[in-house]
């Protein structure tokens, strides 16, 4: 017995020594293998990235079964690219022809990857997981906190054009907080609502019913994603209470004065009531900053589209609600036509706004959506949509390497997709070619580096990445052309760890991988509440980061060795530019994850 105890003690000592040695080795590590931490499907495209600070390029790689350590695959399918970001050498390791299921490790020159998960259910439940963040963002009654907030909203500003005196009260409670702050924007909320509605329409088989309409545990015979979409629709109805009244935002950047739990908002001069900004179609200024609003179309058209898609989906289950949405869609499109142009958000204390600068894409979608509730396609609606499509064939950010914050929003032209589905022949080909042209703009940048990174590192770059992956997927679905499949997968992989920092950009997903732990969020910072499923903003150009106001890292940068003159990303509460989660980006991700899961399971 004594000998056995000594033997065990020696084993423990050796294990501790080896672990200590491994930790020292990791500190001095100069090469890494980046993978999609969430995993890969057996029959899908499977790429890992070799990245090294040394001038070494791999000539082969091998895959080991994790449980046995046995080498089960070797390959020389490597494409070298040279320097990128913090690395001197990078390469794409292609193992798409490896079809085994299980948990594996990739090994190159004695460097091993994190666990490589391959199976048919690798994306199962991921979209539903991200719905947790949407529920946590709810204003009004918040099911995560099991408490209510912002129940006094709000008092009107700039309502003179509709005969509304300043400070008149309208009920605007509900909806979602936009990000870690508690502002609420009609543009992002309408876009998020549309993505959730689309996710249910296109992939109903992936969503479950585990929550009631109020977000608490229980079933109500409605998919949770549709409950969440209805939460958005209900708030949009409040933001368009009458045919001549529509509001663009609730609260403003005075929100940013402090971090607090949402029910503690009281900094707007009227107790717990917050300001409602009427859509006047003209520039608005609070404090010293004037926005560049030119009209009413960009926001109002988003309302109309969401209402029409909602009316279509609820028509079989709630006829009265469907009719209400249909009626509001009509008044919203007329509001959009009052003064063609963009409606930007208003700011009081800082120059940072959602500087949306395009609107014909919103009108294209609104025109196409007018046919959702028609027994027969109305040709005039298609002609109107085609006319708007031709005015913005390619979403402008795709042809650029930079843009202002939310300058071209949404980051994907949903109208092209909804319109193309209603067309055929040459008319359909013309619209899908617009998608192809935009993808090629990004591809021309992406093909120059191993990560296939062509999306610019502007604020909310992860949101653009999600949207671009969706556009690639839609193009393939509409045309049958899969020539961009590897580019699409690269953008998906980027979000889940196949990036220079080796981290997933989604809080808590996957549970076994490196994901954000210290986001710019009051929930985590003040209360240690997990913000499961929240997609963070993502890396930004280093020159943007250095020019931002009020950023100071709270802790030592664990990704310091992966920062570069190109771009930075920090998992640090003090960096609101790269590590703040957003509601609308998460809603878009829910659609993308639903598409990925649906591709691996049969339709109901």
Image (cartoon, rainbow, N blue to C red):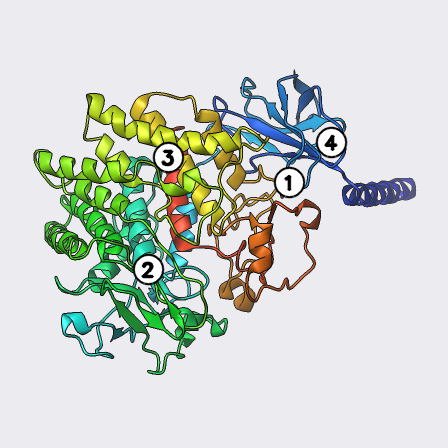
Disc 4 target residue: 111
| Local crowd size for mark 2, using a 10 Å CA cut-off: few (<14), some (14–19), many (≥20) | many
Number of on-image labels:
4
| Local crowd size for mark 1, using a 10 Å CA cut-off: few (<14), some (14–19), many (≥20) | some
Disc 1 target residue: 85
- Percent coordinates x, y for residue 384 in the rendering: 15, 39
Please identify the quadrant where the C terminus is shown.
Answer: top left
Disc 3 target residue: 471
Residue at figure coordinates x 60%, y 53% from the top left: 570
Q: Which of marks 4 and 1 is nearer the N terminus?
A: 1
- Percent coordinates x, y for residue 467 in the rendering: 40, 41
In the structure shown, which secondary structural element does the residue marked by tag 4 occupy?
strand
Please identify the quadrant where the N terminus is shown.
Answer: top right
Q: Give the alpha-carbon distance from disc 1 to disc 3, as whole Å.
A: 26 Å
Residue 405 against residue 147 in the figure, above or below: above
In the structure shown, which secondary structural element does the residue marked by tag 2 occupy?
loop
Residue at figure coordinates x 22%, y 42% from the top left: 364
Horizontal relation, residue 124 to residue 209: left or right: right
Q: Give the alpha-carbon distance from disc 2 to disc 3, as whole Å.
A: 25 Å
Q: Give the alpha-carbon distance from disc 3 to disc 4, as whole Å.
A: 35 Å
| Local crowd size for mark 4, using a 10 Å CA cut-off: few (<14), some (14–19), many (≥20) | some
Query: Which-is-in-front pick, marks 4 and 1?
Result: 1
Residues under numbered marks 4 and 2 in contact, where contact means CB atoms less than 8 Å apart: no
Q: Earlier in the sequence, mark 3 or mark 4?
A: 4
Looking at the picture, tell me which residue is in the foreground, 186 or 531. Answer: 186
| Local crowd size for mark 3, using a 10 Å CA cut-off: few (<14), some (14–19), many (≥20) | many
Of the numbered discs in the image, which one, if any, rests on residue 344?
2
């Amino acid at each position: 017995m004594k000998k056995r105890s000594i033997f065990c003690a020696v084993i423990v000592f050796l294990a501790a020594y080896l672990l200590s040695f491994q930790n020292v080795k990791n500190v001095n590590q100069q090469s890494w293998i980046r993978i999609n931490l969430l995993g890969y499907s057996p029959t899908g495209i499977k790429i890992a990235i070799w990245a090294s600070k040394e001038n070494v390029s791999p000539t082969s790689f091998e895959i080991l079964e994790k449980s046995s350590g046995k080498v089960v695959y070797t390959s020389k399918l490597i494409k070298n690219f040279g320097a990128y970001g913090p690395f001197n050498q990078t390469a794409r390791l292609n193992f798409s022809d490896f079809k085994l299921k299980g948990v594996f490790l990739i090994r190159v020159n004695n460097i091993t990857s994190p666990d490589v998960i391959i199976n048919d259910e690798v994306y199962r439940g991921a979209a539903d997981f991200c719905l947790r963040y949407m529920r946590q963002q709810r204003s009004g009654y918040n099911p995560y906190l099991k408490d209510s907030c912002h129940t006094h909203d709000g008092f009107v500003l700039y309502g003179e054009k509709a005969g509304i005196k300043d400070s008149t009260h309208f009920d605007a409670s509900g909806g979602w907080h936009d990000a870690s702050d508690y502002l609420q924007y009609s543009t992002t909320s309408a876009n998020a609502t549309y993505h959730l509605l689309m996710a249910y329409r296109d992939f109903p088989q992936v969503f479950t019913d585990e929550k009631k309409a109020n977000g608490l545990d229980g079933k109500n015979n409605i998919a949770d994603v549709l409950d969440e979409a209805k939460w958005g629709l209900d708030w949009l109805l409040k933001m368009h209470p009458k045919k001549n009244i529509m509001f663009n935002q609730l609260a403003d950047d005075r929100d940013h004065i402090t971090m607090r739990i949402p029910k503690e908002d009281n900094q707007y001069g009227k107790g717990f009531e917050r300001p409602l900004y009427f859509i006047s179609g003209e520039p608005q200024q609070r404090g010293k900053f004037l926005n560049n609003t030119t009209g009413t179309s960009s926001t109002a058209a988003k309302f109309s589209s969401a209402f029409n898609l909602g009316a279509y989906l609820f028509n079989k289950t709630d006829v009265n609600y469907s009719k209400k949405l249909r009626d509001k869609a009509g008044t919203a499109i007329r509001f959009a036509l009052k003064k063609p142009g963009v409606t930007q958000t208003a700011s009081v204390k800082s120059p940072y706004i959602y500087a949306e600068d395009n609107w014909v894409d919103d009108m294209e979608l609104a025109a196409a959506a007018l046919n959702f509730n028609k027994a027969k396609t109305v040709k005039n609606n298609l002609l109107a949509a085609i006319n708007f499509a031709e005015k913005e064939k390619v979403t402008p950010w795709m042809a650029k390497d930079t843009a202002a914050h939310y300058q071209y929003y949404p980051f994907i032209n949903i109208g092209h997709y909804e319109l193309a589905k209603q067309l055929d022949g040459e008319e359909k080909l013309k619209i899908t070619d617009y998608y192809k042209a935009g993808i090629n703009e990004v591809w021309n940048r992406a093909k120059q580096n191993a990560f296939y990174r062509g999306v610019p590192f502007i604020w909310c770059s992860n949101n653009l990445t999600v949207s671009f992956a969706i556009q690639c997927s839609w193009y393939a679905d509409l045309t049958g052309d899969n020539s961009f499949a590897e580019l699409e997968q690269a953008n998906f992989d980027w979000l889940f760890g196949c990036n220079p920092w080796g981290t997933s950009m989604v809080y808590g997903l996957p549970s076994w991988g490196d994901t954000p732990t210290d986001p710019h969020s009051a929930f985590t910072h003040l209360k240690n509440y997990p913000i499961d499923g929240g997609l963070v903003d993502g890396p930004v150009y280093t020159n943007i980061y250095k020019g931002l106001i009020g950023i100071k890292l709270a802790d030592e940068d664990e990704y310091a060795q992966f920062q570069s003159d190109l771009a930075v990303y920090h998992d640090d509460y003090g960096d609101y530019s790269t590590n703040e989660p957003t509601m609308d980006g998460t809603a878009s991700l829910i659609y993308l994850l639903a598409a990925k899961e649906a591709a691996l399971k049969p339709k109901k």
